[in-house]
Image: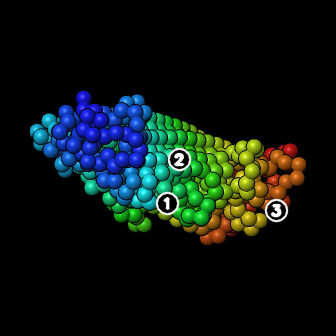
Amino acid sequence: MTNVRDFGAVGDGRSDESDSIRHAVEQGDGHIVFPRGVYRVTRPIEVELKTHGRTALDGEGGTARIVMDAAGPAIRLVGTHDKTAQPSDFRPGVWELERMPTVTGIEIVGEHDESDGIELEGTMQATISGVLIRRCRYGVHLVKRNRNLMLANSHIYHGRGPAIGVYFDGVNLHQSNILGCHISYCAHAGIKIERSEIRNLQITGNDIEYNFEDDLENSADVWIDSREGTVREGTIASNTIQAKNSPRGANLRIEGLDNELANKAGLWTISGNLIQSQAVNLLLRSCRGVVVTGNSFCSGYERSIVLEKCRHVLVGSNTFDYNPDYSGDRIDGITIRNSAGCTLSSLTLESTRAGSPDVGGAIEVFDSREISITACQVLDPTHRGIFLSNVQNSRVSDCTVLDRRPDRTMAEAIRVAGASRQNMIHNNLIGRGTSGDLVVAAGAADTSGNLRSGDQ
C-alpha cells in the first residue's frame, strides 16, 4: 500500500498535490491510497499501466476528495491493449501489467470549465466502483479503444456546462456494464455514445434522471448516436429514467444511419424501466431489431414513443399512463413513420392526447408497411384511438378502443386514411366517436368481426 501522504501530499485543499501524487504513482507499489482529505491537482493523475503495472487508486471508502483545478481529467488510465477480448488476443504483458485498473471510494470535483472526472484509453477490465464525480464536463470519458469496462455503484452528478455523465467518445469498446449508478443533472446527456463501435453494453439498475436543460436543445438521459459508427447488442433494463420537458429532448434516444437496412443501431432490448417526463420518452430513428417490453411510460410532452425509419421493432406489454400528481401539458401516444416490419402488442394507453381533430391519434402510423397492432387497449383518447395513413400490408386486430368519459371527444375509434391498401382490421371492440366508430377509406382495408360496444 502506497500512501500519498508519504510522498508529500497534505490533503488541505489548497496546495497543488500534482507532483506528490505523481511520485506516489511512479515510485509506489501500485495500490495508491488517498487518506481522508482534499487533494487539489492542476494536472491529470496519469497512470501508464505498461510502465507502472497493476494499479488501484483508493479513496478509503469515499473519505478522500480530488479537486481538478485545470482542464482535462482528474484521473487518466492508459493501457496498450489494442485487440479484442478473446484470450488469444492478449499479449503477455497486458495480463501481467495492465489488467483491471481500479478506482474506488474517491470523490472527484471539477473546478475548471473543462475539468473531467476519469478518462480511459486502451484499458482492459477497468473497474470503477463507489466513486462520486461532480461538477465535471465529462464524468467518465472513454476514448480510442477499451475492453470490458465495469462502472458500478457510483454517482455522477451535476455536471459542468453542457455536461455528459458517461461519454463513449469515438471509442471501440466491447463488453461494458453500467450498473447500480446514479447519473443525474448532466445538461447534455446522462450517458452518450457517438462516433463509436460498441457491442455488448448493459445499462442496468440505474437511476438516470434530470439530464436536461431548459435552454439546451437535444438533451437526453441516454443518447446512443450511431450515425457514425455502429452500436449493437445492448440492454437497457430495470432503470428509472426521467427528466423534464426540454426542447427536442428525450429520455431514451437511439439513432442510426439513415439507410435502407437501418443496421447501424439495433439488437437492443429495453425492458422493465420506468421512463417519464420529457418531450419524447423513447425515440428510435433508423434502428433495427429493437425489443421494448415491460416498461412503464408516463408524461411524454410530445409523444411517448416515436419510431422513424425503423425495421423489425417490437413494442409489447407496456403501459402508457399519466400521474395525476404531476402537472404539465403531456400528450403521450405512439407515432410510427416510414417504418416496416414493426409490431405493437399488448399495450395499454389511457387518456392520450396525441393527434388532432382531423389527423392522428393515440397510436398513429404514417407511410409504413407490415405493421401489426394487436391486443392493445386504447382508452379515453382525446382525438382518435388508432390512425393509419398511407399504410399497407398491415393489421389491427383484437384491440379495444373506447371513450368512456361522460363528455366524449374521440372522433373515431379507428380510422384508415390516405393511399392505404391491403390491410386488415379484424375482431376489435370499438366505441362510437363524434364522427363514427370505424372509418376506412375505400379499398384501404378488409374489415370483419369488429364489435361496436353497446354502451357507447
**Nearer the observer, disc 2 or disc 3?**
2
- The picture places residue 289, in percent across and down from the top left corner, at 43, 51
Residue bearing the label numbered 1 = 162
Residue bearing the label numbered 3 = 435
- The picture places residue 136, in percent across and down from the top left corner, at 44, 52
Residue bearing the label numbered 2 = 184
Q: Of the residues shown, which amino acid type is indicated by label 1? A: Pro
Q: Earlier in the sequence, mark 2 or mark 3?
A: 2
On the question of residue 324 being in view, the answer is yes
**Contact, CB < 8 Å: mark 2 with mark 1?**
no
Q: Which residue is drawn at 39% across and 54% down?
A: 69
Q: On the rendered structure, is 435 left or right of 61?
A: right
Locate residue 22: give its quadrant: top left
Q: Which of marks 1 and 3 is nearer the N terminus?
A: 1
Where disc 1 sits, the SS reads: loop
Nearer-the-camera pick, 277 or 376: 277
**Nearer the observer, disc 1 or disc 3?**
1
How far apart are the alpha carbons under marks 2 and 3? 46 Å
Disc 2 residue crowd, few under 14, some 14–19, many 20+, Cα 10 Å: many
Q: On the rendered structure, is 84 left or right of 264?
A: left
Q: Of the residues shown, which amino acid type is indicated by label 2? A: Ser
Q: Is residue 394 above or below residue 86?
A: below
- The picture places residue 274, in percent across and down from the top left corner, at 58, 41
Q: Which of marks 2 and 1 is nearer the N terminus?
A: 1
Locate residue 424: give its quadrant: bottom right
How far apart are the alpha carbons under marks 1 and 3? 48 Å
